[in-house]
Amino acid sequence: MYNKRIKQTFLASLTVICHAQSFIVNGRSINLRHTVVEVSSSVDPLDDLPFDDATLEDIVFDMDDMIEDPEIVFSEEDLSNLYDISIPGINSTDSTPIPISLSDFQFISSDVAYFYLRDELGLSEDTMWRITNEAGSVLGMKASTLREKVAVLKTSMILSDEELRAMITVFPTLLHLSAENNLAPKIRFLLQELDLKQEELKKIVTGCPPILGYSFENLSSKLSFFTDTMGFTKKECRDILLELPRVIASSVETGLIPRLQFLRQEIRIPNSDIRKIVKKNPRVLTMSVEHNLQPKLIFYFIMTLYMQPDEVRKLLLSYPQILNYNLENHIQPITRQFLSFDFSAYEFSRMLLRFPRLMTCSLTKIKRVVSYLRFALGLEASDVRRVLHQAPQVVSLTIENLQQKVDYLLEVAEPGSVAGHPSSTRVLRKLIVGMPSLLHLNIETNLKPKVEFLQTQLGPEELSKAIDRLPTLLGYSLDNRIKPRLMQILEAGVDGGSITVGIPMKEDKFEGWLDRRAKKMAKENETKENGISPSDTIPKLLDTDEKGRIKENDGRVVHWVRKDR
């Protein structure tokens, strides 16, 4: 159907064609500045337009005010004839129309940038508008010129049509660059300087298309910053650009150097540690000092949470991605939430140092975990605070994950108990509050192997008693602590249940304790073998005078009275 939008768009399309002064068609020169399509319709196209002849003339001949609509496709009927609309005395001295056939028009349009970009490359309407606004002169180029540029890009990086369209959308000026003098040399430069593979080059360029628009001097200075100023190797530099290609878009003088100096001088982070931080999170080098780094590192970590610069350094080395989170909308609301749990700012800073990824959790998730500990498990508010303070990792777990661990621990510590029952609250309180880190240990790879080993050596009932005496027992390493200590105890002839006494000790104290315990057990065994009860030996050890040193109260020994010898 013929409508007003088609007519307006077609006039705009002809404006693009008119960037070329003339074409040679079938051996004759045709001046396109005096050419327009007569569209077959029952309605006069010019009469139907909402402006007079003078305005129409301005639209047709004023190149800067025209628009393009890349979605419109014309039929052969619409393009049936082309006529010269020269107006004698106004825009032409020749009053004789020169007809152009549809085949002539198709020949002309095949080398017009507008139609090539819209129809062959398949650029969207929004992208066409961006090209018009940001790189309008591209529409005046021949399609053959653009094809050459596109060929260089696609063959050098094996780009798909979709990837090419995405690059042009992000950086329309890319089409301005010369294939021979800019694109090809720039691609060779990047391949050689960074020792890139074709796929790596593709990832960097598609991640930051403006990189092809920088001068060789500009690119060299940026690469020199990474290798010479910061001390990265070529491989490390390549890895950083592959991780975050747009880091190359930062200015050396006004962006990269000020950020590096801030971390060095204000936070007192040595260059070697800055390299580690940047390798983990290259975004640090793209963050504004004034609006990002300074408010987070100085105002929040140091002034609000009372961290020392060295603690901030350790935090960034552990999890530099914490700087990626918004201060006002994410970091501060989470901080206020924990302060509402009656933590001090200093206590919260300790939690962050233990588990910086706490900031990856949403407020909703944090509240849900706290509610589960408080109400589903029946822990007191002070107990919940201890769990969060000692093991902040629990806020990153799902309720389902927590429930599975609680059920498993209950079954081991007190078989038959069910979470939520009053009888289980005491067990859970002793177990979880005594060793909060049990909640973030994996059942299959951590808890279960320990339980199976201890149950084999001690028996399920004795293990339950041992956990009751020492709730932290399952928190020790199986291979580095539980196995070697228990095997030494059993080999020494000491009761395995005494592991609850021996396992917390340091190595030297443990050896001394085990030696004494083994001798005592040997003596007791010897006494039993001789048929003498330990209670029978007590009277023999006390003569009449010694017996008088015992103070009794209804048969209960109160204390001993020492006698001077």
Image: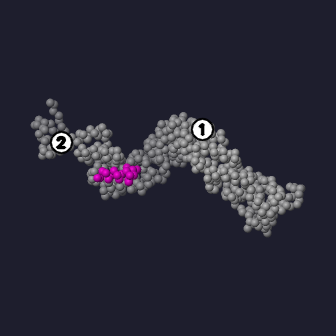
Q: Residues within 10 Å of mark 1 (few under 14, many from 20)?
A: some
Residue 446 among those drawn in magenta: yes
- Badge 1 vs badge 2, beta-carbon distance below 8 Å: no
> Label 1: which residue?
224
Q: Residue at x 21, y 40 (%)?
A: 519
Mark closest to the chain's N terminus, 1 or 2: 1
Decide which of 372, 235 is in the foreground and name it.
235
> Label 2: which residue?
523
The answer to whether residue 115 is left or right of residue 492 is: right
Tag 1: amino acid: Ser
Residue 29 in sight from this viewpoint: yes
Decide which of 192, 404 is in the foreground and name it.
192
Above or below for 209 versus 99: above
Tag 2: amino acid: Lys
**Residue most extreme to the left:** 544
Above or below for 371 versus 557: below
